Amino acid sequence: MNFCAFAARIAFVAAFSLGALAIAAPRASAAEPISLLIDCSKIPTQNIAITRETIPVKPGAMTLYYPEWIPGEHAAVGPIFNVAALVIKANGQTIPWRREATNMFAFDLTVPAGATSMEVDFTYLGATTGRYSSARLGSSNMYVITWNQNLFYPSTGTIQDTIIKPTMILPGSNWQFATAVTGAKRAGNTVTWDDTSLEHLIDSPLDAGINFHRWDIWSDGAAHAYLNVIGDQPQDVDVSSDVVGHYGKLVREMIAMYGARHWRNYNFLLTVSDVIPGEGIEHHESSDDGGRADYLTNPVALERGADLLSHEFNHSWDGKYRMPAGLYPSNLNTAYDDYLLWVYEGMTQYYGDVMSFRDGLREQKYFPDHIAAIYAHYDNQPGRLWRSLGDTATSGPFLYYAPFGYGLERRGVDFYAEGELLWLKVDSIIRDKTNDKMSLDDFSRAFFGGQNTGPDVVTYTRADVVAGLNKLVPYDWDGFFTKWVDDIAVHPPDGFSDEGYKLVYTDQPSHDVPRNNFVYSLGLAVGQDGTIGDVAFGSPAFKADLGINQKIVAVNGREFSPDLLYQAVKNAKGTTQPITLLVERTLDYRTVTIDYHGGPRYPHLVRQDGMPDRLMEVPKPRT
Ligand SMILES: [Zn+2]
């Protein structure tokens, strides 16, 4: 997953367990498929998808499950609240079902004597809510099918040996689609695919739309990588060849680094829409990506979100092919162990960003500003004094859904961006110990590359990561991860200090930290309208008794604006005059004074004379 909201937060701040799932006897026949028909014809008008499943069964008691723990989302987020009109029948008779009182995703029923199959009908309500895939179904001219939302599966077998025969009804003849499910055959508005495992089906979402453009951006023999873009309007998918070229280079850069791929064909599935919210969910042979309508046509928007596709693409190697053992499911209703997300998501955050420089979507000269902004954010985060980076990963199942307010004290899914710093530090150590002959890329090639394969899974543990690094460069890697991941670390890993750089604060904003960022001065994150998003515990703003869920309405007696607050911070420098704020909390107003005289402060990395500039080796392209 790409925690796009993280970038938003940085901008804001800077601006069941079933236990063991009851696996009963194997299904009557592992080869006998479940027929899955999803009627999408009502999505453009009513935002509902209608499912009919025909499931081979044997008479007797059984349980149907609605998927709860969703791969790539790392949490129990199956949108069961959107399941409606559930009717189960066999031999033309309705079968009563009972939801288990302590497991709301499990439905118990009894298959009548003589029945060999049953029909499961239900409607998926696109009453979208929350974050990630639950927030996306469709608009009047596009939709995204995340198959786990549109099916039940029986308590027999695994998702690897449960076989599905998928069929979909499209809304009209002018609708096009893309998915990594193979063998598509279209007759009118009905599409069928090859039989596929439940595991691969849910790993292969489908995007469909009217405004649809597909580019073949890379090929090697029979293998292709495609960029599929679906937009609100035709002009949103009218993408320049220059932009498309950067994505071709992204694929070449990834192949050059890993030396092998673990996909047959790869499909980027990208919605560009102001109706359907953004997204970034990884899969073996595709990614479910979403940006705003102008994502590909506005250079500022593209530069800001340039790591979206590179991040999700990297997961095909790191997260999908090589998968933490605790995250590899045999069913979709057993809790995950998210601890190793500091590898899965942390290193992917690193490469997602690094590749956005190597593929040319971002300019290499801004790499130091990018690293400085991340480092400063975590170094000024008081929550790191009580919670380890590893605990943020273990807490992933709820931290993805935590409120943003007081995030500096709570901490969030920090294993992404602090993970980036962690792996930059590993890169720095490898370069240092090998006299610049090797880098993290060599570990990645050895650990995630190997030979070309299809969408296979090879699991790993923390010990495997340590052993893989030791094979490359002998070092106390176990102690290193204990220090930076498992223990409380006052500062984040500084992968730039041995690479010829030092972090300083000046009164000049940077490419990545804008002028109206007050975190490094007042310890305050405030929105355009004065709403306080966060206050760093111990900061001048905290000492002035400011908190979240309130709004600054005036600065030194004048109506609030971010520019006015900036001027107030600037003017208070070197004086004894406090900054006076009028603050509204619901119907109450109060005046607070902030006694701060240090002026505006922004983080930068500056070169250290006499030391090799290793940092700028990182964003250099290989192709
Ligand atoms: Zn991710």
Image: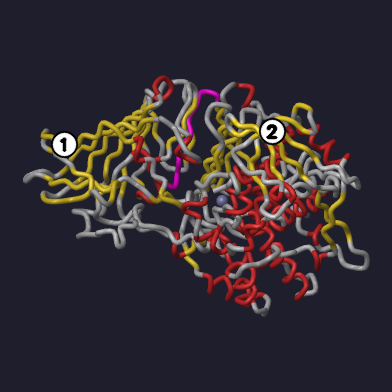
Point out the stretch of residues depicted in magenta: 203-211
Give the number of marks: 2
Whether residue 542 can be seen here: yes
Single out the residue that lies furthest toward the right. Answer: 609
Q: Residues within 10 Å of mark 1 (few under 14, many from 20)?
A: some
Callout 2–callout 1 Cβ contact below 8 Å: no
> Is 383 inside the magenta-drawn segment?
no
Residue drawn 53% across the image and 74% down it: 463
Residue drawn 7% across the image and 44% down it: 114
Residue 321 coordinates in the image, percent (x, y): 51, 58
Question: Where does label 1 land, which residue?
Answer: 89
Q: Amino acid at mark 2?
A: Gly
Vertical arrangement, residue 323 with respect to residue 227, above or below: below
Image quadrant of residue 188?
top left
42 or 601, nearer to the observer: 601
Q: For mark 1, give the secondary structure.
A: strand
* Mark-to-mark CA distance, 2 and 1: 56 Å
Residue drawn 58% across the image and 69% down it: 486
Q: Amino acid at mark 1?
A: Lys
Residue 78 coordinates in the image, percent (x, y): 39, 44
Single out the residue that lies furthest toward the left. Answer: 113
State left or right for residue 123 relative to residue 262.
left
Residue 299 coordinates in the image, percent (x, y): 74, 33
Q: For mark 2, give the secondary structure.
A: loop
> Is 208 inside the magenta-drawn segment?
yes
Q: Earlier in the sequence, mark 2 or mark 1?
A: 1
Question: Where does label 2 land, which residue?
Answer: 530
Residue drawn 34% across the image and 29% down it: 39
Image quadrant of residue 149?
top left
Q: Residues within 10 Å of mark 2 (few under 14, many from 20)?
A: many
Residue 203 coordinates in the image, percent (x, y): 44, 47
